[in-house]
Image (cartoon, helix red, strand yellow):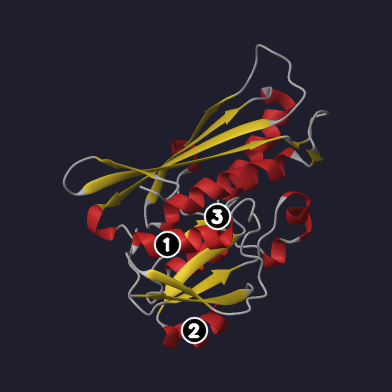
Amino acid sequence: MNRDISLIELNKENRLVVACDSLGGIGPKEGDALRVEGELVGKLAVRVALMEVLAVRARPISVINTLCVEKDPTGQSIIAGIEEEVKLLDVDIEQLLNGSTEENVATIQTGVGITVIGVAKKEELRLASSAAGAALVAVGLPKVAKEVLTAKEVMADLEVLQQLLSLDYVQDILPVGSKGIKYEAELLAKLNQLRLELKAELKLDLEKSAGPATVLLITLPANKLDKLEKTIDKPLNYLGKLAN
């Protein structure tokens, strides 16, 4: 699997979907390169792995945080952010969350690891569902590091992902992270055994890191583009299409 997930066969009908993400040097501790509140660290860190699992239409059943900081106060603030983000989903937080903190050694820099485990029926998974001729659209703008602090309105998030999941004409959804839009677009085409045809003179930086999945790539029939624009309240950029 070339996507940032692992698939594990439980039985003939069901699959586990595992996604993970890490974050370092961003947080409230003295050694952090970017000083932000722990709550924001938790929200953004868990969002990435949740998006990866949800994007393939799996249901999260476990969210694990491995925090390289003390539980109180830094760990507690990060966990609060994780909980706030997970509450956006229709899940039982008490059953879902688990984790660990560093209680033996004093730390001066924030480090976070997140693992999300989901489950889905084999026939419900959407790993490569794009048809030849499908339009390719970037939802959200690539933002990274400090930019994320002031770019909430133009970033993809869990709310817009859930909107996209509810649209029956959306074929594939692929979160974009540090490798940039072009890399993920080429991967999406390859997974579908199709060819990527990018539009000429795109104004979007296709190589730029999208940090904590601030962009979602989606495919859909070209005749649904107008409908998408009326539904999604985030920047939309038509990138081209997937062709035979």
Within 10 angstroms of label 3, few (less than 14), some, or many (20 or more) residues? few
Please give the residue where the numbered disc 2 appears in the rendered image. Answer: 225
Disc 2 residue type (three-letter)? Leu
Q: From the viewer's perspective, is residue 97 above or below residue 136? A: above
Please give the residue where the numbered disc 3 appears in the rendered image. Answer: 88
Disc 3 residue type (three-letter)? Leu
The secondary structure type at the circle numbered 3 is: loop
Of callouts 3 and 1, the N-terminal one: 3
Whether residue 86 appears in this view of the structure is no
The secondary structure type at the circle numbered 2 is: helix
Hey, which residue is sitting farthest right in the picture?
A: 30
- Residue 188 bears which disc, if any? 1
Within 10 angstroms of label 2, few (less than 14), some, or many (20 or more) residues? some
- At horizontal 68% and vertical 42% (from top left) the residue drawn is 41
- In this view of the protein, which residue sits in the foreground, 197 or 162? 197
Of callouts 3 and 2, the N-terminal one: 3
The reply to whether discs 3 and 1 touch (Cβ–Cβ < 8 Å) is no
- At horizontal 46% and vertical 62% (from top left) the residue drawn is 186
- In this view of the protein, which residue sits in the foreground, 15 or 85? 15
CA separation, marks 3 and 1? 27 Å
